Amino acid sequence: MGFSKEEISKSRRFWSSLWRGIKTVFVLFTMFLSFIIVSAPIFLAVADALLPSALLHRLSSPANLSSHLTNYDFRHSLIDIPLISIIRSAVILCVYGLCDGPKLSRGPYLTITMICSVSSLIYVSLKAAFVFGEPAIGDGGGNYCRAAEVALFLCSTVLAIGHIVVAYRTSCRERRKLLVFKIDIEAKDPKGLSVKGGRNR
């Protein structure tokens, strides 16, 4: 049994609409992914400021947080871990906002991000040696607290490494942009390039 021309036309319109919908979704997904990649330093800085603070809030009550501030002890208090993350993310975000293309490619953004991240990693590693050097309490509450402490230290460490990776990738991306822009300028202005070459001789 054959299909009529009207049925064939409807089938073609359906598949054409479906294909256009798939292409639209793909383009939107690509644009969203590109936006995430370009804005990765901002999203990572926000996550760095919020996640450790949220973990510490789950670990301690507000009364305990205030006592951590008043009776700070490097070996036991954990309030400095989210504070370091907030300071680190604020500094990196400010430097990222103040830098343009050339400074993002090879300049203060990558350098300051490396300094902040590496110094915070050293501090967190030293603090972890003191915090986890003491044995955990054997009951279930002690095990939960120790697991939350491990999650807090891991979160801060992973976010610090993430800052380094994102800064390096951002620097490479901006360097490629500047290289493409330079090649484009030289292609559009060969006379200026020849004049420069003559002067160098």
Image: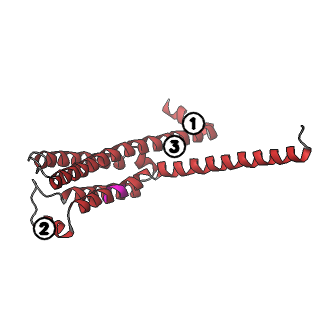
What residue do we see at 34% from left, 49% from top?
108
Q: In the rendered view, would you say 1 is above or below 109?
A: above
The residue labelled by disc 1 is 193
What residue do we see at 44% from left, 40% from top?
172
Q: In this view, does 131 lie to the left or right of 115?
A: left
- Crowdedness near tag 1: few (<14), some (14–19) or many (≥20) residues, C-alpha within 10 Å: some
Q: Specify whether residue 47 is painted magenta.
A: yes
Write down the quadrant of residue 5 in the picture. top right
Q: In this view, does 126 lie to the left or right of 30?
A: left
| Residue 67: assigned label | 2
What residue do we see at 49% from left, 40% from top?
176
Q: In this view, does 147 lie to the left or right of 18?
A: left
- Crowdedness near tag 2: few (<14), some (14–19) or many (≥20) residues, C-alpha within 10 Å: few
Q: Which amino acid type corresponds to the residue marked 1 in the rendered image? A: Leu
Q: Which amino acid type corresponds to the residue marked 3 in the rendered image? A: Lys
The residue labelled by disc 3 is 177
